[in-house]
Image: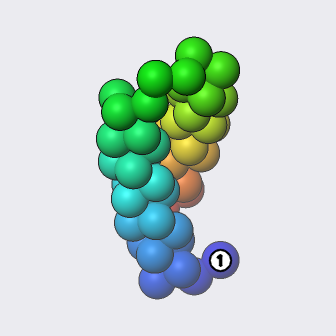
Amino acid sequence: MKTAYRSFFIVLHVIGIIAGLFISFTTQDPVTDKLIVSILILLTLNLVRLSQHLQ
């Protein structure tokens, strides 16, 4: 994968993490909150993997 695509995906992951945090803090449903937290964990792990392969 080219560096431009990886950089684009990194930006998308950061936007997704910010949106997930906002949704997690504003939701009142515990099931939705746990779902968003698990998606945030997956996004963060994938972001770390992408940033390691970028170097």
Q: Can residue 40 be seen here?
A: yes
Nearest to the observer: residue 31 or residue 54: 31
Above or below 19: residue 30: above
Q: Choose between 15 and 34: the one closer to the eye.
A: 34
At label 1, the amino acid type is: Met
Residue at (46% x, 54% y) in the render = 16
Where is residue 11 shown, x and y percent of the image?
39, 66
Q: Nearer the viewer, residue 26 or 39?
A: 26
Where residue 12 sits: x, y (%)? Answer: 46, 65
Q: Which residue is mark 1?
A: 1
Farthest residue to the front: give it.
28
Image height check: is 41 above or below 43?
above
Query: How far across and down, in percent of the image, does residue 22 sit?
Result: 34, 41
Relative vertical location of residue 52 with respect to residue 39 in this rendering, above or below: below
Relative to 14, 36 lies left or right: right
Give the vertical position of 37 relative to 14 (above or below): above
Q: Quadrant of residue 34?
A: top right
- Secondary-structure class at tag 1: loop
For the C terminus, the quadrant is bottom left
Residue 52 in view, yes or no:
no
Rendered-image quadrant of the N terminus: bottom right
State how the image is colored.
rainbow
Q: Quick one: label 1, few (<14), some, or many (20+) residues within 10 Å?
A: few
Please tell me which residue is depicted at 54% across the width and 54% down the height of the picture.
Answer: 50
Give the residue at x 55% y 22%.
29
